[in-house]
Each structure stands twice: as C-alpha cells, then as structure tokens.
Image (spheres, rainbow, N blue to C red):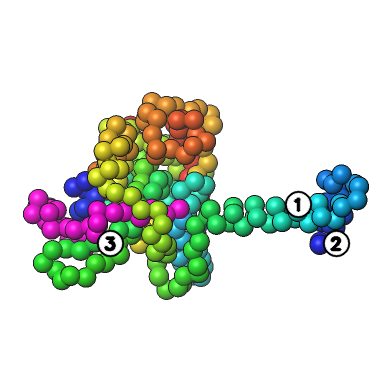
Amino acid sequence: MIHRNAKQGYQRTSKTDGFEVQIAKHERRQERLRTRSKSAQEKLPLGSPEEPYQISKSRDRAFDIGKFLHDNHADPAVKVSPPHPSYNYY
Amino acid sequence: MDHFLSQIFSDTVGREFTDQDRRSILIRDNRIFRHQVLRINYTTYDVRRNQDSINIRTQSDVMVLADNETNGHPYWYARVIGIFHAMVRRSGFGNEWEKRDFLWVRWYGLETSHQFGFKAKRLPRIGFVDTDDNAFGFIDPANIIRAVHLIPAFYHGLTSELLPASMARRKDEDDQDYNRYYVNM
C-alpha cells in the first residue's frame, strides 16, 4: 500500500522540483487527521465476558445535574417516569 | 429527579420509595458522566456467548424483559438516548462511593391489535409512546437482554406529533419519528 500511496500523492503535487516534500507534507496531514478523528471517539477496552455489560469508566464528559435539568427543563425527554410504560397501544 | 434517584437503587424494588429514601441518595459532586457506547454480553439461542454494541448515535434499540406478560408478549422495547454513570452512595450505608451505571431510554409501545408471530407470519409492530404517557425512563444496563433490529414501517409514515424537538432524537432525524417500527426476529 505504501508504494501506491506515494504514487497517488504525486497527483496532488505541483509536479515540479520539490514534489517529494509536498507528498511528505500531505501524508503527515492525512495522518494527523486520522489520529484526531480516532481520539474523538470514546475508547472502550475489551471487557470481561463474565459481566452482563460494559460501560466506560471515563470521566471526560461530566456534567452537573442541576445545571442540566435547568438548561433542558423545556425538553419533555427530561421528564422521566418509573419503568412502567403503559405498554398498550390502542 | 425523584425517579432518577429511585432507579439507581434498584435493589429496593418492591416497595414504594419515601422522600426520606430519596434524600438518602447522594451523588458525588452532583456530577454525571456521559458515554457514547455500551456493550451487552448475552447468550444466543444456541447457548453461545455473543456481544452487542450499543451506540446512542447509530445502533441504540434494545429489549428488556417485561414486568408482566399483560399482552402475551414477554418483552419491552426501548431506544437508548443516554448512557451514564455516577458515583453514588446512600447515607447511613457506609462512606464508599459506588459506580452506578444507568441508561436513559425512550420507550416503545407494542401495538396489541396487530397480529404477529410465526403463526401470523408477521413481525411485532411497535411505536414510540406519546410524550404524556411515561415515554421516558431509566433502566439498569444489566437488564438489557440484547440489542434489537428495528425496521421502520415506511407505509405508516413519519410523524412529529409524538414529541416536539428534543435531544432524545438523533441529529439526522429532523425532529420526526416513524409512526411504527417492525421488530426483526
């Protein structure tokens, strides 16, 4: 793959002297974008199959309950009921 | 807020919660931690272990065991709209903070007048319940049986009447829901 990527990269250069540097810069940019999009996703290492489920222990995305409820008081989704939906439709 | 607190301590199920119970639940720093993914381990029909990955932005429909088989159907269906954990403790029960996971869900209701099953050769049909009708709740992730694959019932069309614009919906849903979904089985 590497030998092909380099050749495709040539298409994007000015095709004059110094195109090697241009290809290299392009590759670095691509790589940076790749790692950045990866870190935006939540990482969840493999968990034990013995557990019924697995949720991250990450504390990165914390919020304050009071502020959250205040900011979203108009959203009907915030009004939560006990788990007894009247499970009838019609 | 009450419901949220009572849900966290599901070990006391079976009796009504008092205000005193609710006050006894402490959440460290009043903070909740949000997550994007959840993995469910389950047993398949041929008794092997398998894993479903739940992501609130892509695959988020799950099934849980119903409390009772009122309609002859043993499952409830829900869409996970939030995956959270908080450090929780109950005053009078030691000083240890405990990690508690919980999911915020939007419930589906079963259409009971629709015949389904192997005999009827139809899939069960469900739809989001009306907002006034206990549409949202919290569940313990350990109660999830597995993820479900829902197929929008295109024939029955889209609606925005069940719920106004809300964070319960995904960004790409244009504030609309399908009236009905078929549960693939």
Task: Give the percent coordinates (x, y) of residue B83.
Answer: 39, 53
Q: Earlier in the sequence, mark 1 or mark 2?
A: 2
Q: Residue at x 38, y 48 (%)?
A: B82
Q: Which residues are magenta?
A: B8-36
- Which residue occupies the foreground of this view, B72 or B55? B55
Task: Give the percent coordinates (x, y) of residue B85.
Answer: 33, 58
The nearer-to-camera label among 3 and 1 is: 1
- At label 1, which amino acid type do we have? His
Callouts 1 and 2 close, C-beta under 8 Å: no
B28 versus B177 height, above or below: below
Task: Report the disc number at residue A26.
Answer: 1
Mark 1 belongs to which subunit? A
A79 drawn magenta: no
Can you identify the residue that label 3 sits on?
A: B87
Where, quadrant-wise, is the C terminus of chain A in this rendering? top left
B22 drawn magenta: yes
In this rendering, would B90 be left or right of A87? left
Q: Residue at x 21, y 46 (%)?
A: B1
User: Do we see residue B119 in this rendering?
Assistant: no
Can you identify the residue that label 2 sits on?
A: A3
